[in-house]
Image (cartoon, grey):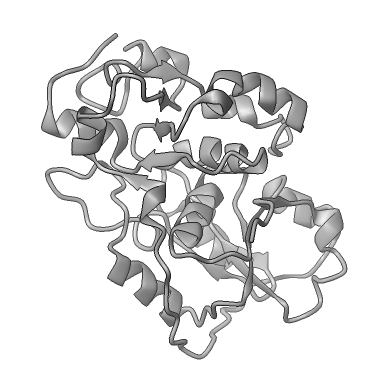
Amino acid sequence: MFMFPTIQMTDLQQLVHTDQIRWFDCRYDLQHPDYGREAFKESHVAGAQYLDLSTDLSGPRSKTGGRHPLPSKEQWVGTLQSLGVERDDFIVLYDDGFPYAARAWWLFKWAGHERVVVLEGGLSSYLAFDFPMSTESTVFEKSTYQADFQDDMLIQYEEVKNRPAETYLVDSRSPDRFQGQNETIDPIVGHIPGAVNCFFEEAISPDRRLKDAEDLKELYADLLEAESPILYCGSGVTACVNVLALHALGKTDVRLYAGSYSDWISQTDEVAR
């Protein structure tokens, strides 16, 4: 069953006051890791729970795996169970824009959860309707969530390194970082040899919504023709925006290199600029 990966607040407004929605706040700031959790404590969508990029949407860091390695299957299922998520829940994810909610969306889809969407426009689109906010923590009874992991959504370092020459590999970072300029995060500049650049921000409008289908089709013209393309970024977070946008166009055979560039350079010095 295909479910469109995003939703507009206008389409959600009739459901806001029901128990049909499980809201998850995914706000985060890479420069200020405590921002999202503090913002959530200050005010959040009534009934929402918080998903933290570092502790919930990522696993423990090691020598390889990148800056934001995926949580293990056991860790992610444990998180969903502890939050009381059920298989048929309708999940709505939001942040201040897109990237962190998109990462959560990818993880839900990886676990085989069908009914999950990212709120277009983020929290500001919810606030525009003057719907209730809260400072209270909502606790659900622990669930027995059973995942159905879709491992074809994922690709690892060795597979990227040994990929067939015709495989389309897409770097989702900004053009300057792709070209090895203005790098402030990774110790080795450049990109994975053979990659092309498609900056994730190009898929998002100034009001933090996906651009319309025609614009996205133009942006991803080559990608849409490629078979099982691979997408990566710096640490497997912002590439999820491109993955989500491609799903919105019905292109679902895309694979995420979750470790991304930060994993790549931890295992090889083969880079291009």
- Whether residue 18 is visible to the viewer of this picture, yes or no, is yes
Q: Quadrant of residue 166?
A: top left
Count all numbered tags in the image, as a single digit: 0
Image quadrant where one finds the C terminus: top left
Percent coordinates x, y for residue 85 in the rendering: 52, 78
Which residue shows up at 62% across the image and 76% down it?
A: 89
Position of 92 with respect to 184 (left or right) is: right
Q: Image point 31% across, 15% down: which residue? A: 194
At 50% from the left edge and 58% from the top edge, which residue is drawn?
109
Image position, residue 261 (x, y; %): 28, 30
Above or below, 88 against 186 in this view is below
Name the residue located 68 percent from the left edge and 50 percent from the top edge.
Answer: 6
Residue 63 to residue 175: above or below: below
**Image height of 215 relative to 157, above or below:** above
Viewer-side residue, 168 vs 91: 168
Please tell me which residue lies in front, 91 or 25.
91
Q: Is residue 212 left or right of residue 30?
A: right
Residue 126 location, x and y as percent?
Answer: 77, 56
Residue 173, percent from left and from top: 43, 25
Which picture quadrant has residue 244? top right
